C-alpha cells in the first residue's frame, strides 16, 4: 500500500518570501507520478505541479518548483515570491499503477501581508 | 471545456431523505471518481468508474450508491444517511494517463440533519 505523509500541518510565509512544504511517501512501485494540489477556500482541488518518477529533473511551473529525491522518497514543494493568493491547503498526492490518486494529510499555508 | 461540474453546491438532507449528487465532464475522460472529504482532512477515495464500469468500491456503506449513466455523467445516490456522513463530496475525472492527474469539481457540501 502507498502512504503519503506531510509532516507540517501548518506553515506561514511573508508575502514575497519563499516557503518549502515537505512530503514523503512510501511505495514499492518503480513507476509512479507525484503531484501537488492546492485547495483554496473555494474548495476546488487545483493541480499545481506534477513529477514523473522516472525523470531526475525537478519539475518547475513558474513560481512553483519541486525537490524530488527518489531514493529518499521525498517530494517537497517550493513556492517563491509568495502571493496572498497562494494561501490554501496544499496536498501532496501519489498516483499508483492502477491510476488511483491518494492524498497526504495536507499543509495549511498562510501568507502574511 | 476543461471543467468538472458538480451540482448541487450545497445540500441539507434529513436522515430519511433520498437525494442525489451529480457530476458532469465533457473532456472525454473515461475514468471518474467520487471522494469524501471531512473538515481539515484529505479527500478519501470512495468509488472509481472506468469506462462506465465500477472498478473500485472502497468499502463504502450501501447507503451510498454510485451510478454512471454515460461517459460524461456520474451520480451518487444517497439514502438513509447518518450525521457523520456530513462532508464535502468531490468528483474527479481523468483521461487514464497518469501524468495528467485528475481534474476535480468544486464539490457538494453535504449536511445530514
Image (tube, grey):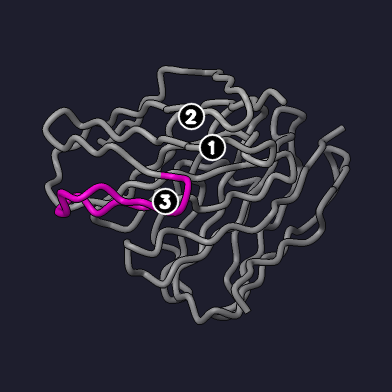
Q: Earlier in the sequence, mark 2 or mark 3?
A: 2
Task: Specify the subunit that label 1 lies on.
Answer: A
Residue at screen point 58% across, 57% down? B104
Q: Is residue A91 left or right of residue A102?
A: right
Of residues A90 and B44, the one drawn nearer to the viewer in this rendering: A90
Residue that badge 1 annotates = A81
Q: Is residue A36 left or right of residue A56?
A: right
Element at label 3 = strand
**What residue is rendered at 40% in x and 36% in y?**
A77
Q: Are marks 1 and 3 on the same chain?
A: yes
Alpha carbon of mark 1 to alpha carbon of mark 2: how far?
6 Å
**Tag 3 residue:** A49
Mark 2 sits on what residue? Answer: A18
Q: In the depicted view, which residue is nearer to us: B60 or A15?
A: A15
| Region rendered in magenta | A49-64
Residue B87: x %, y % from top left:
70, 36
Amino acid at each position: 500500500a502507498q502512504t503519503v505523509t506531510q509532516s507540517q500541518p501548518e506553515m506561514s510565509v511573508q508575502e514575497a518570501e519563499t516557503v518549502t512544504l515537505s512530503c514523503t511517501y512510501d511505495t514499492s512501485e518503480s513507476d509512479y507520478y507525484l503531484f501537488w494540489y492546492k485547495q483554496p477556500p473555494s474548495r476546488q482541488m487545483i493541480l499545481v505541479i506534477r513529477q514523473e518518477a522516472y525523470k531526475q529533473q525537478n519539475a518547475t511551473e513558474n513560481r512553483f518548483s519541486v525537490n524530488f529525491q527518489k531514493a529518499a522518497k521525498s517530494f517537497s514543494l517550493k513556492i517563491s515570491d509568495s502571493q496572498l493568493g497562494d494561501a490554501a491547503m496544499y496536498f501532496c498526492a501519489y498516483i499508483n499503477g492502477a491510476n488511483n490518486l491518494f492524498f497526504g494529510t495536507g499543509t495549511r499555508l498562510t501568507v502574511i501581508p | 471545456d476543461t471543467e468538472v461540474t458538480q451540482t448541487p453546491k450545497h445540500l441539507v438532507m434529513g436522515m430519511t431523505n433520498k437525494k442525489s449528487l451529480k457530476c458532469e465532464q465533457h473532456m472525454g475522460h473515461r475514468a471518474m471518481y467520487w471522494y469524501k472529504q471531512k473538515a481539515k482532512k484529505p479527500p478519501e477515495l470512495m468509488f472509481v468508474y472506468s469506462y462506465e464500469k465500477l472498478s473500485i468500491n472502497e468499502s463504502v456503506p450501501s447507503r451510498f450508491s454510485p451510478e454512471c449513466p454515460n461517459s460524461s455523467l456520474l451520480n451518487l445516490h444517497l439514502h438513509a444517511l447518518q450525521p457523520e456522513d456530513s462532508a464535502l463530496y468531490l468528483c474527479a475525472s481523468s483521461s487514464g494517463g497518469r501524468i495528467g492527474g485528475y481534474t476535480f469539481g468544486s464539490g457538494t457540501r453535504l449536511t445530514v440533519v
